[in-house]
Image: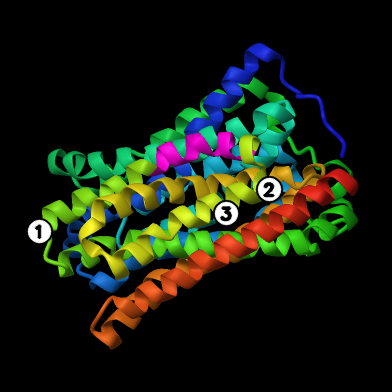
Amino acid sequence: MSVRTPRSPAPSLWGVALTIVLTAAVLRSPIVAVAPVARDIQADLDVSAGVVGLLTSIPVLAFAVCAPLAVATIRRLGPDLALTLALGGALVASVVRSAGGLPAVILGTALLGVFLTVGNVVVPLIIKREFPPERVPWMTSLFTSAMNVGTMTVTLATAPIAAVTDWRVAIAVWGGFGLAALGVWVGLHRAEALRPDPGPAATGVAGRLDGRGRAAALTLSTWLLALAFAGQAFAFYGTTAWLPSLLIDGGMPAVQAGAVAAIFQVMGVAGALVTPVLTSRFSAAPAAVIIGVGWLAIPLGFLLAPDGWLVWCLVGGLAQGAGITWVFIMLNGFGGDERVVAGRSGTVQGLGYAAGALAPPLLGGVHDAAGDWAPALLILLGAVGVLLVAGAVGARIGVREARERW
């Protein structure tokens, strides 16, 4: 496996790290910002709750559908300009979403999904290029932790901002993460951040996978990692959508249910930070098993002993933060150069986010049909099982391939 020397000198790596943290915040905050002001949006635009729900689901669907487009963009423009485009595009899309009526809101939301997908795919490449191999897992952990911190910040602060301004300002202001990241990034790399640098992989049709990238996208380890991420994303988005309702149906007051659901999210930060320790101490496959077993706390816990909700949310929260971090670490950990990682990343994220987008409506529909949460929890249990098995098997194969092939 070839190892590239980090391109940036040591002092500027702090700037790259800051860019990654700010980018991570903007990759989720515009999506999460809708929920706290959903009723305000619904009343102002005179639309149904289902239409408002699209403002959250459209970007997640875009993460799945547009992943190949993101890979093509990165191959045509190079990682530096691709990140600049992702940040600048997300900033513009945030303004569009808040600037008009329903057509502008839908258009801005769709554009957000497209540009944020490019950011999702390109950040692991930049981490791999800029940091020594021993620091890549920790930088990946920092990246996913910053996603969770950004999500928490937006969840807590959007409604108070809307109370003193309006919902348009409250959801647009989080584009400031992107503006700050763009300023740091362009300040660091100047010309490189503003000009195409496609390299040898972008010959022919724009973004076409070359042999190495196509090989990475079609290996068994990549498909198993994609299945593992599908299980992780399905479990995360499904739990995030319905955990408060599950608690309320169990007799918990709505305010307390919201606080407990927040615990599940907050613990994701700790889970993300501990994942490099798991992967270095136990290796990739045992780490996948530990994470999967931790995730079992949510479906099995609520099926067998729902009164232990606090324990299940604490353990499950740790596992959800560790799960996504583990997947992103493995995007680089399975070996290969930027072209290989781009092909692998597009495949894994495309399948994973498709499963994540499916989870809320499927679990909600199953609950409505059954009149009980048990069938939905059994489906969630199946998704966690996919994460555990595909993750463990895929890690063994992928790590071996990294040693022998790349």
What is the number of the mark on residue 289? 3
Q: Callout 3, which amino acid? A: Val
What residue would you read off at disc 1?
253
Question: Which residue in the rendered view is the most extreme toward the top?
Answer: 11
According to the image, what is the colour scheme of the structure? rainbow
Residue 74 visible, this angle: yes
The 10 Å Cα crowd at callout 3, few under 14, some 14 to 19, many 20 or more, is some
What is the number of the mark on residue 133? none
* Badge 1 element: loop
Residue shown at the point (16%, 67%) measured from the top left:
250
- Give the extent of the magenta segment: 268-279
Question: Where, quadrant-wise, is the C terminus in this rendering?
Answer: top right
On screen, residue 299 versus residue 335, left or right, reads left
On screen, residue 123 versus residue 335, left or right, reads left
Residue shown at the point (38%, 37%) measured from the top left:
149
Q: Callout 1, which amino acid? A: Pro
Badge 2 or badge 3: first in the primary sequence:
3
Q: Estimate the x, y position of residue 278 in percent, counting from the top left.
A: 57, 39
Q: Is residue 27 magenta?
A: no
What is the number of the mark on residue 331? 2
Residue shown at the point (81%, 25%) measured from the top left:
5
Q: Nearer the viewer, residue 389 or 54?
A: 389
> Distance from label 2 to label 3 (Cα)?
18 Å
Q: Would you say the residues marked 1 and 3 are in contact, meaning their CB atoms lie under 8 Å apart? A: no
Q: Would you say the residues marked 1 and 2 are in contact, meaning their CB atoms lie under 8 Å apart? A: no
The quadrant holding residue 309 is bottom left
Q: Estimate the x, y position of residue 393 in percent, counting from the top left.
A: 69, 60
